[in-house]
Image (spheres, grey):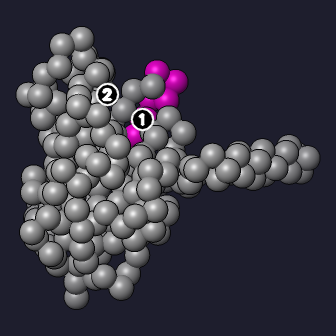
Amino acid sequence: MTKKISLLVFASILCSNVLAQSGKIQLPAPNGIKTVKMSLMTALQNRHSVREYNENKDIPAQILSNLLWAACGYNRPEEKRITAPSALNMQDIVVYVCRKDGAYRYNPGLNCLEAITTKDLRYAVAGPQSFVKSAPVCLVLVSDQTKFKTPDKTIGALDAGYVSQNICLSATAIGLATVPRGTMNKEELIKELGLKENQILMVNHPVGWPKQ
């Protein structure tokens, strides 16, 4: 048994090293099912938009992992199915994570963050609304229209809405604060995130701890 545990630990370390060398940050396995006690109905009762955050308190990797899993992570990994509905199961919504240390693409299959840039793009997510920059994390939802045979922005918007609602409710249950927004500096984000013509910015969420 000890030997098996040692092998698992070694494999985990090896995997983490490989991810680090390839510009990926491995997230802890989601454990919200065990650690988050708030019921869905209570989360619905308590959900409200918040625009003031504690800028001195970061979001730990474990909590970020739980939040991203709730947004659109694999809840049926053997079938590669996610927590949010999506048209024809195309899973077109990609979540980008913008922090002080850079911007990343969330990979639900590997449960990791794929580095895009070391620039702090929260200013671009904020646009003219400066309060956003006080949030330690900004989640940007993009519809990858190349997933569809015929691009359809309406379907992309619907799929983004499902993921956005998941973020709102899971953030509430975890104790985080957020607000869904359509405002952002799209030209800057398209440039810095390297988005192509059929990768459409839909909505964003500044996320942080409520300001006391």
- Reply above or below: 145 against 124: above
Nearer to me, 143 or 78: 143
Q: Residues within 10 Å of mark 1 (few under 14, many from 20)?
A: some
Q: CA distance from mark 2 to mark 1?
A: 13 Å
Q: Quadrant of residue 28?
A: bottom right
How far across and down, in percent of the image, does residue 168 sit? 20, 55
What is the tally of numbered marks visible in this picture?
A: 2
Point 35% across, 43% down: residue: 194
How far across and down, in percent of the image, does residue 18 sit? 70, 46
Q: Which residue is mark 1?
A: 75
Is 160 placed left or right of 64 in the picture? Answer: left
Point 17% across, 19% down: residue: 151
Image depth: mark 2 or mark 1 in front: 2
How far across and down, in percent of the image, does residue 177 sit? 22, 69
| Numbered circle sitting on residue 146 | none
Verify whether residue 76 appears in magenta.
yes
Identify the image quadrant of the N terminus.
top right
Query: Mark 2: which secondary structure?
Result: loop
Q: Mark 2 vs mark 1: which is more N-terminal? A: 1
- Reply above or below: 53 against 101: below
Name the amino acid type tagged 2: Gln
Point 14% across, 64% down: residue: 127
Q: Which residue is mark 2?
A: 91
Point 16% across, 43% down: residue: 202
Q: Residues within 10 Å of mark 2 (few under 14, many from 20)?
A: many
- Reply above or below: 146 against 142: above
Identify the image quadrant of the C terminus.
bottom left
Segment tinted magenta in the rendering = 73-79
Nearer to me, 169 or 158: 158
